[in-house]
Amino acid sequence: MKNSILAMALMAACAGSAWAQTNDTLAKIKSSGSVTLGVRESSGLGFTLGNGKYVGFHTEMGERILADLRKPLGLSQIEIKYQPVTSQNRIPLLQNGTVDLECGSTTNNAARQKDVAFAVTTYVEEVGIAVRTNSNVHHIKDLNGKSVATTTGTTSVQTLRKNERATGVDFKEVYGKDHADSFLLLESGRAEAFVMDKSILAANIAKAKKPGDFKILDDVLSVEPIACMLRKDDPAFKRAVDDSIKRQIKDGSLAKLYDKWFMQPIPPANVNLKMPMSDSTKAAWANPNDKPMEEYARK
């Protein structure tokens, strides 16, 4: 009888563990003592230095979020595993449990909210255009007849096409598999412009062999809220993530982290991006929310 009871208990524990894997991220973390953070390799908010080292504003913020989980979970430490994600696979890897929290450079929009949940907004992005400094492209209209690069799985080219200033502008789209590949298309001359989040453009320019050869145009194509992604229907985990972000905002540590990554020299080339915090990001921090970009468009 004791063996039967033990067997039933083990089966229940296994079933509970399987349920936790998909529906209760906090239980999964407590049980395993580890968590997988989805990170980017060439984003403006997170990138790699090689040899498994991932850094950046959102990467470090994500690490702080996960560290804040130790006390409520009763863990002395949590092992953070890093899983590089791309624009194409970030949502599937989150949904299937490979990644527990994704802190890359993902736009919170209504379409994605059908598949995943978002933490409160931590960065409000402007989508822009990078060109070579000696380019004759100065505004959107100058892209007519040109090749424009962007990254597969992003919405940047669609954003450009929908921009009223692009009406009648005919350009050819070329795609990079990731942001570094897209910038390489511009750097090598296979594209005359790279359309993407300005933070991503700035970060890739900073890492270029000759940063002075590139510039970001003044044109702003759209304003988009960027936030960490997590699985849907996991309110306890979302609350824990949001509480950590709000704590970091309130105690000023997130502002210091922003200054570190956008207003100070950063690796690998010790280039200062010189990107002061925008009024839109300040407003998002003053009133933390998880509104999709469509809410911003209505303003």
Image: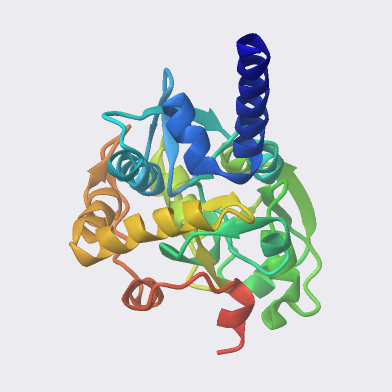
Image quadrant in which the C terminus is located: bottom right
Image x and y of residue 74, in percent: 31, 36
Horizontal relation, residue 120 to residue 255: left or right? right
The residue furthest front is 1
Question: In the rendered view, would you say 40 is above or below 142?
Answer: above
Q: Nearer the viewer, residue 180 or 69?
A: 69
Q: Residue at x 31, y 67 (%)?
A: 277
Question: In the rendered view, would you say 158 is above or below 82?
Answer: below
| Number of on-image labels | 0
From this viewpoint, is residue 208 visible? Answer: no
Q: Residue at x 50, y 38 (%)?
A: 27
Image quadrant in which the N terminus is located: top right
Q: Nearer the viewer, residue 65 or 198?
A: 65
- Which of the 4 quarters of the picture holds residue 110? bottom right
Horizontal relation, residue 149 to residue 203: left or right? right
Image x and y of residue 272, in percent: 27, 49
From this viewpoint, is residue 129 visible? Answer: yes
Q: Residue at x 30, y 54 (%)?
A: 262
- Which of the 4 quarters of the picture holds residue 247? bottom left
Question: In the rendered view, would you say 140 is above or below 253?
Answer: below
Image x and y of residue 23, in percent: 63, 45
The residue furthest bottom is 299
The residue furthest top is 3
Image x and y of residue 253, in percent: 20, 56
Q: How is the image coloured?
A: rainbow
Q: Nearer the viewer, residue 293 or 193?
A: 293
